[in-house]
């Protein structure tokens, strides 16, 4: 079993309102907004975009998330170093982190149990 392409982009920002407005101006639609400076936007049937506000003293980061349909059947190949195995997230999914040969971290997301 392998990944099934991109699930999402997780994007951090210093200003949720401006970031959400920017992506809405590019055709994204707000699917939901939290009460703590974050929300999910979509543009068509592609990967979703989750934007979260972080404090000014933290450098905003971005993460690409790959879809794993069946965590039990998934085994990364020899070129992927497992940094963290699948574990529950506070938002109801299971995530694993792997490192590619150039040192980049990749998030793999499977449905919650």
Image (cartoon, rainbow, N blue to C red):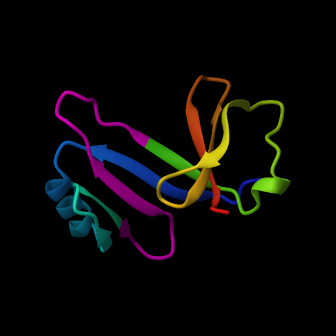
Taking the spot 28% from the left edge, 30% from the top edge, the residue there is: 59
Taking the spot 27% from the left edge, 64% from the top edge, the residue there is: 34
Where residue 7 appears, x then y in whole percent?
A: 56, 60
Would residue 1 be visible to someone looking at this image?
no
**Which of the two residues, 45 or 83, is positioned nearer the viewer here?**
83
The reply, left or right, for residue 62 in relation to residue 32 is right
Taking the spot 36% from the left edge, 48% from the top edge, the residue there is: 11
Is residue 23 placed above or below 16 in the rendered structure?
Answer: below
- Segment tinted magenta in the rendering: 41-62
Where residue 67 appears, x then y in whole percent?
A: 64, 58
48 in magenta: yes
Would residue 41 be visible to someone looking at this image?
yes
Where residue 13 appears, x then y in whole percent?
A: 25, 44
The reply, left or right, for residue 46 in relation to residue 85 is left
Is residue 57 placed above or below 6 in the rendered structure?
Answer: above
**Which of the two residues, 52 or 92, is positioned nearer the viewer here?**
92
Where residue 32 appears, x then y in whole percent?
A: 32, 72
Is residue 72 placed above or below 96 in the rendered structure?
Answer: below
Task: Give the position of the N terminus as an image quadrant.
Answer: bottom right
Q: Quarter of the image holding residue 42?
A: bottom left
Taking the spot 47% from the left edge, 59% from the top edge, the residue there is: 91
The reply, left or right, for residue 89 in relation to residue 14 is right
Task: Give the position of the C terminus as an image quadrant.
Answer: bottom right
Q: How many labels does the image show?
A: 0
Q: Quarter of the image holding residue 54?
A: top left
28 in magenta: no
């Amino acid at each position: 079993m392998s990944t099934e392409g991109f699930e999402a982009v997780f994007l951090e920002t210093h200003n949720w309102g401006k970031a959400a407005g920017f992506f809405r101006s590019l055709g994204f639609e707000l699917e939901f907004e939290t009460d703590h400076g974050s929300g999910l936007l979509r543009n068509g049937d592609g990967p979703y975009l989750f934007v979260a506000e972080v404090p000014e003293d933290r450098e905003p980061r971005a993460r690409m998330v790959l879809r794993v349909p069946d965590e039990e059947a998934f085994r990364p190949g020899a070129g992927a170093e497992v940094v963290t195995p699948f574990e529950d997230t506070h938002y109801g999914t299971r995530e694993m982190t792997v490192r590619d040969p150039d040192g980049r971290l990749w998030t793999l997301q499977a449905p919650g149990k």
